[in-house]
Structure formats: structure tokens, C-alpha cells
Image (tube, coloured by chain):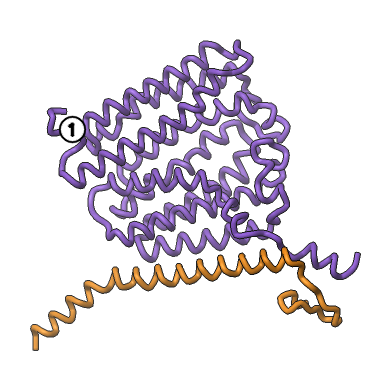
Chain colours: A purple, B orange
Amino acid sequence: MSVNDQIDNDISLAMPGDYFELMKPRVMRLVVFTAVTGMLLAPGAIDPFLAVIAILAIAIGAGASGALNMWYDSDIDAIMSRTSGRPIPMGRVNGNQALNFGMILSVLSVMTLGLLVNWVAGAILAFTIFFYAVIYTMWLKRSTPQNIVIGGAAGAFPPMLGWACVTGTVSLESIALFAIIFIWTPPHFWALALWKMRDYDNAHVPMMPNVAGEKSTRAEMLAYAVILAPLSASPYILGFSGALVGALSLALGLAFLWFTYRVWAIAGADEKLVAEKKLFGFSIVYLFLIFALLLLDAVVFRATGSYLLAGMGL
Amino acid sequence: MDVGEGKIEDGVSIELTDAQKKARRKRNIAIAACLIGLVGIFYVATIVKIGPAMMRAQQTQGQNR
């Protein structure tokens, strides 16, 4: 090998877009959406410019944890069809570059949120990154089928973060928003795992269907859906959304329960796993709609002083 | 070794390929944009956070005179 060849191999061809992909932009979008909702639902005001900075810092923090996840998981990402096209398995970015990128963004995002918004929010962001990168990715993911149950907390923190940006505290209301995403995560992921089981098996990731069996997984999914249905209306029960949104959220929770019930009742008799795919699709719609409704209600409340259609006796 | 200058210690020069130059240039521009953005954010946030307090302090001083 000539000197030139050797150096060619060391010099990166990574484009900025490859680094952006390390930040899991689709996850980042969901994080921004739920954090904005938490921020608008929280009582009190925040300077609009600081609010934009807070959202940016939360998004970058989420991206940082995504990059750290891709750095650590590049070996199993290369095996699974869903993740084999990521920048590290494709060779566009190497592991060290992803690690450095993730670490730098973690420090910058936490520092920015702490210094410019408040340190409660900064501390929650730091904990979220630590939880996702270390507790979930490095520890739980490869060691227990409860991986996504506990790891789901990382995805549930953003609305709590948004809330903390405005109030500087953690309260029952923000814990309710956390709980909705936390309880939603297991049935959402296990619906995917039921039809991607072989993928996870090949990568030796102990997902619930591979370890405890499909029957037990379906029963657990149903249990989570039973809890999620009333929990969907908790913002109304706790008094930070209106009756209309409360009723619609409950309806969405019941629909989620119905889709999960179908998965449990059919019990894999359908080889195409249509019920599982439908539940997975609906779970995404559910989470989007719940938070979109809450966001709408929060905007209406801030603009008019009352919740959606509250003037019509609702 | 100084890859950035296209030279290494024993005097053998290294020519980056066009693709490498292009990628490096794009990365540099992205880093510059991010740094400028970060400076801008801290500059404006400082004004937003301490500006009103400074205005009030000036007004109080004016009234005291």
C-alpha cells in the first residue's frame, strides 16, 4: 500500500448530510413536536426567542443521543435490514467520528439549555441523553427483553423537558405527559418486533417476542393498552386540557386498545401479521394526534383564555 | 503529519481527491455555519435576558438624578 492509499483511507468522505443522518432526524421531529406541546401546555410564559433556543437545544440533544446510539450499535445495525443503511454500517462515517460528534453535541446542547433557559431543563436533557445512550443503548438493549420498556423513558422525557423550560419544575401534569409516551412505547415497539423478530434474533437483541414468546408479548401489549386508554385522557382529568380534547383523546386510547385487542385475539393466526402492522401504523397516528390535539388546545387556551369549544358548553 | 497542508513529515506530498476536497469543504462550511449560529444565539439571548434589567437600571439612575 502506498502512502497515498493509506492516507486516502484516513481522510473522510463524510458529507454534512451524513452527520445529520446520525442525529436520527425522524426521531428528532417527534421530540421537537412533543417538547413544543409540553412547553405550550405549561402554565406561565417564556420569551419566544428563548423558547426557540430551548427547542433547538432539545432537538440537538436528542440528535446527540441518536449519534451516540449509532456509534455504539453500529455492529448490530449492520445486521438488521431496517438499520443497515445507516451512515456507519454504510462506511460513510466511522465510529470515532460519530462518537466525537455525539459527545460534542451533548455538551453543547446541555450547556446551552442550562445557561440560557434553566438548569432544571438542562439537567433533564443531560439525564435523557445519558439514559438513552448509556442505560438503554449500552446496557438494557442487549441484556433484557424489558429493554424498550425502561428505555422508552428516554423518548418520554421531551414533553417534560418542554414543561420544565417554562416552569423550571417537574410536576404531576408533566409526569402525565411522560406517562402517555412511556406506556405507549412497549405495544408500539413490540408490534414492530413481532414482524421483525428474525431481524432482532439475527442481531442477538433480546426483544420480548424472541425471549418470552409471541403469546406472552401479545398479552403484555394488551395490558399496556388497557392502561393507556384512560391515561390518554389524563391531561383533561388533571385540568390542563379541555373536555373536547379529553373526549377525543379517550376515543383514541380506546381505538388503540381495539387495535391491540385484535393483535391479541388473532394471536398470530394470520401469517401476514396484518393486525400487528395495523397496530404499528395506528400507534404512530395515535401519538401524533394526541399531542396535536393537546397542542391545539394549548394554543386556543393561550389565545382566548378557554379551551377548545369550551364556550359551547363543552 | 499535516494532512491539511497536503504534506507529511518525510516530504511525500499528498494530493486529496476531488471528492475528498469537496467533502472537506462542505464539512468546513457546515461547522462554520453552526459556530456562527451558536455565537448569534448566545449574543441575542444575552440581550434578551439582561437587556430589560439594564434598561430598568438606566431609568432608575435617570430618575435619581
Q: Is disc 1 placed on a helix, strand or loop?
A: loop
Q: Which residue is drawn at 67% across and 64% down?
A: B23
Q: How many labels does the image show?
A: 1
Residue positioned 26% across, 42% down in the render: A298
User: Residue A265 at x, y = what percent?
Assistant: 51, 11
For residue B47, what is the image quadrant? bottom left
- Name the residue furthest right: A1
Hey, what amino acid is under mark 1?
Leu
**Image quadrant occupied by the C terminus of chain B:** bottom left
Label 1: few (<14), some or many (≥20) within 10 Å? some
Task: Please state the horizontal and vertical placement of residue A239, each as a whole percent of the image.
Answer: 22, 36
Furthest toward the bottom, the residue is B65
Tell me: A9 left or right of A173. right
Residue A252 % position (x, y) = 36, 25
Where does label 1 land, which residue? Answer: A309
- On screen, residue B5 above or below A275: below
**Left or right, A310 with reference to A74:** left
| Relative height, residue A278 to residue B42 (above, below) | above
Dot 1: chain letter: A
Tell which of A49 and A101 is nearer to you: A49
Quarter of the image with the N terminus of chain B is: bottom right
**Residue A209, image x and y in percent?**
62, 24
Q: Residue at x 65, y 38 (%)?
A: A142
